[in-house]
Image (cartoon, rainbow, N blue to C red):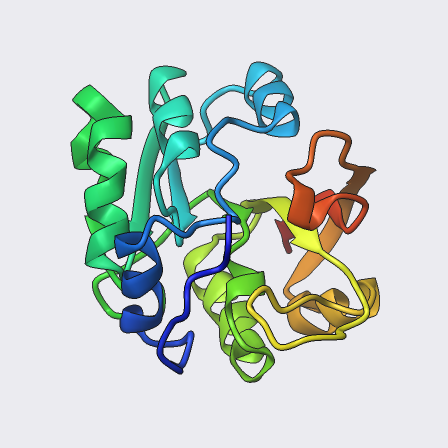
Amino acid sequence: MATPTFPKLDPTGAEFWEVRYREHFTPWDAGRVPKQLQDFVAGEEPPGRVLVPGCGSAHDVRFFAEAGWDVQGIDFSAAAVEAAVPILGPFASRVTRADFFGAEVAGPYPLVYERAFLCALPRREWPRWGARMAELIPSGGRIAGFFYYEEPHKPGPPFPMRDRSELHALLDPAFEAIEDREVDDSISIFVGKERWEIWRRR
């Protein structure tokens, strides 16, 4: 399928994502729950409140909810939230329209699930992301999810990190890395370029 032509918009604004959801152009959306997340949930007791920022169509939010976890997905695109409603079914109330950086998102969240949210943000926004994670997550809480690494060679999004030193620069010293694994069921745009990682709040 040919890539639609979109107006030039800033990905930090909701309209950038609105037009893509309205055109059903969401190549970052796996349409399924990743194996690493399934394994993670299977091996854990619900930790308390879970936040899924930039949740999009919210397959992962529904998975958390079906497992009995107290999950809240947020997206600042109204079109993304609308796309999530039929996928969420009886769990539609678990997703709301909200800005991750806004006052309407208030911690503490013992777990924040990362899935193609950081790489949707331009690099200039990354320090805000790291600082916000430290605000929302209490001591002992965690970030768990997928992080995208590739030498940048084209305009984003997605915006990759070059290596793990960049992620350390964003999360140290507030967090410590406690897990780092290869991913074997990535969607095509991320194959060989993402890792499953867990970071614990000090």
Identify the image quadrant of residue 15: bottom left
Q: Residue at x 60, y 79 (%)?
A: 123
Picture layout, residue 74 above or below residue 99:
above
Residue 155: percent from the left, percent from the top? 62, 77
Q: Is residue 28 above or below residue 20?
A: above
From where the camera sits, is residue 198 visible?
Answer: no
Number of labels in the image equals 0
Q: Is residue 89 left or right of residue 112?
A: left
Quadrant housing residue 64: top left
Decide: is 111 above or below 152: above
Q: Is residue 191 visible in this depiction of the protein?
A: yes
| Residue 191 image-quadrant placement | top right
In the rendering, at what x and y percent does residue 87 appear?
28, 28
Looking at the picture, tell me which residue is in the foreground, 133 or 195: 195
Residue shown at the point (64%, 20%) measured from the top left: 39
Which residue appears at 66% of the width and 59% of the height?
Answer: 175
Residue at horizontal 22 percent and vertical 53 percent from the top:
79
Quadrant that contains the C terminus? bottom right
In the rendered structure, the answer to whether residue 25 lies left or right of residue 82 reads right
Nearest the viewer among 121 and 127 is 121
Residue 2 pos. (x, y %): 50, 55
Q: Nearer the viewer, residue 81 or 104?
A: 81
- Residue 154 image offset from top left, x and y in percent: 69, 75
